Every structure is written in C-alpha cells, then in structure tokens.
Image (cartoon, helix red, strand yellow):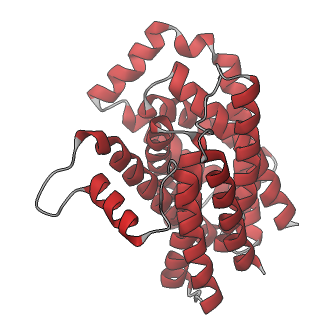
Amino acid sequence: MWLFVAVSAYFINAGVYVADKFLLSKKIHSSITYAFYVGIWSIFNFTLLIFAPWIPTLRELSIDLLAGLLFLVTLIFWYKALHQSEATRVVPIVGALTPIFSFILSFIFLGQSLGERQLLAFLILIYGGILVSVRRTKFYAIKEVWKSARNIFGDVLGGIHAHYRPSRRLIINSVVSAIFFAAYYVLIKYIYGHQPFIGAFVWSRLGTFIGVLLILFVPDWRKHIVEHRKEGKVPKNLFFFLSIRLLAALAFIMLNWAISLGNVALINSLQGAQYVFLFLLVLFLSKKHPRIIAEELGGGVLLQKIIGVMLVSTGLYMLIT
C-alpha cells in the first residue's frame, strides 16, 4: 500500500516542480517570497483535526514545531536551487542525495545499517545524478571531473571565475536542501513512530506557519514580499498558484503517510519514478510549449539525461530489491 501511495505522490510532485519552476522564473523571482506564500497556507491543515482531535504534550509539540520550521528552511534552499537552473537538473541532484543523507541520518539516529549493495547503489545514484544535472561534458574521465570541480569551487587558496559562481551556488543550495530534506524525513519518521499521524502532521504544519510569520520580522524579506504584493503578480496568478498548492499539499500528505507506514530511506529512494515523470513532462512541454518552459535538450544532452535517468533508476532499484 505504501509503495503505491509513495509513487503516486512522486507523480504529482513531478508536475508541481515544473509549475514551481515556471512561477519562480516567470512570476515570483524570490525564493523567500515563494516559500512565504507556500508556507502561509499551512495553517489550514488544522481543519484535519476535526477528523482526529489530538493535543500533544509540551515535548511532543516542541518536536513537531521543530520539524515544521526545518521544512520551511528546506523549502527556501530548494526554491533557490530550482530558481537557478532547469527542473531536470535540480530535482535529480537533490533527489539522488536525499536518500544517501537519509541512510546516514537513519543509521545515526534510528540505528539502520548500510550493506555493500546499498553502498554500490549510492555510487550509481551519485554518478547518474551528475549526468542528469550537468550539461554535456566528459564526466567519464577522472581528470575532467577534477577540472570541473576546481572550476566550480576554485582552489583552496584562491577564488573562482565569475562564470562558475552560479554553478557553485546551485550545487551548494541543492546539497543543503538535500541534507535538510533528509533531516526532515528522518525526524518526521521518528515523530510518526510516537504520535498519531494526523495529529503529528497538523501540529508540525503549525511550525511551518510560525516560521512564515518569523520571515516578516526580517526587513529585507518583508520588503520583497510587500513589493510582489504591490506589483499584483501574486493575486493575478492566485488561482493557478492555489491549484498547484492543493496538488502539492495532496502529494505531501500522501508522502508523509507513506513514510509513517514504511522505511523513510526506502521511500526517498523511490524518487527514481519521479525522475521519469519529470523528464517526460518537461520533454513534452519543451517541444509543445517552449514559451512556458524551456529545457536544454540538444547536442547530445537528451541522450546524456536519458543515461543519467537510467543509472539513477538502476541505483534506486538496487535499494528497493
């Protein structure tokens, strides 16, 4: 049951990520502002308590609120990365690293161990994620890998060329969001193991809502939000935005339910299905509606992305079998 629910959630998320990329690129150019409008709706999750009333203890509430705040921080870094590059570059980086960090954190805090097959799958996931995330390059050569890394991150004692700084920011934001995603999933798995699902989900969303309110206390962030409001961009696209948020909320609830039932790292590893859905969707939109979303697929990039998706899917298959 949890397998079907998780794959269905990733299918919905693929469409949500493409829509988020469109909104971040064309409508809302601030990850803070976008995270604010996403998180502000968390308060409406309290309506779910009608079906299963539950009040946590002070300790349980503290952990729930921490999980919600952690998720909001994750969203900010995630939207920063998504705003900086193509959806099919960012999602595979974060998606390939999140299961790895989940396994590490699960080993530390939940006592799960890693086998040889899983370690091999990690290497395949990383390499496949690189092939999907970077533009066409000779990543089969160790020398090229080292050269590219030095170009992006620079020497130890010196800076880097301005041309490579966006790539470095993209990688940093993607890695940080992957770490936070993993931390959130492991923490929420712990919470679901000690609290009822609906109650824990609702109270953790309160943490996200509180985090959104705290954003308003930062002058620069509040200024960005007010400016977007005055420009009329958010109200004009409110119906589309709310539709996407409803789908995202549905997928989020489904994914959290799957995590409450199954292994958190195993469920994260199922994102290989999401890569396939995302890749096919972006490929379709790039050909049929290039003005809506553009994706670099020429000059061998398409073949490279296909190979990368196949490698990632292979690695994820190794983790679940």
Task: Say whether residue 54 is visible.
Answer: no
Count the labels in the image: 0
Horizontally, residue 250 falls left or right of residue 96, namely right
Using the image as rendered, state which of residue 165 and residue 215 is in the foreground.
165
Residue 57: image x %, image y %? 56, 64
Residue 185: image x %, image y %? 58, 64
Horizontally, residue 281 falls left or right of residue 158, namely right
Using the image as rendered, state which of residue 81 and residue 195 is in the foreground.
81
- Image quadrant occupied by the C terminus: bottom right
Task: Say whether residue 153 is visible.
Answer: yes
Residue at x 63%, y 27% (from the top left corner): 293
Residue at x 58%, y 54% (from the top left corner): 132
Residue 250: image x %, image y %? 76, 44
Residue 173: image x %, image y %? 40, 50
Using the image as rendered, state which of residue 31 and residue 120 is in the foreground.
120
Image position of 119 with respect to 293: above or below: below
- Image quadrant occupied by the N terminus: bottom right
Image position of 210 with respect to 133: above or below: above
Residue at x 77%, y 34% (from the top left corner): 284
Residue at x 40%, y 16% (from the top left corner): 226
Using the image as rendered, state which of residue 126 and residue 6 is in the foreground.
126
Residue 262 falls in image quadrant: bottom right
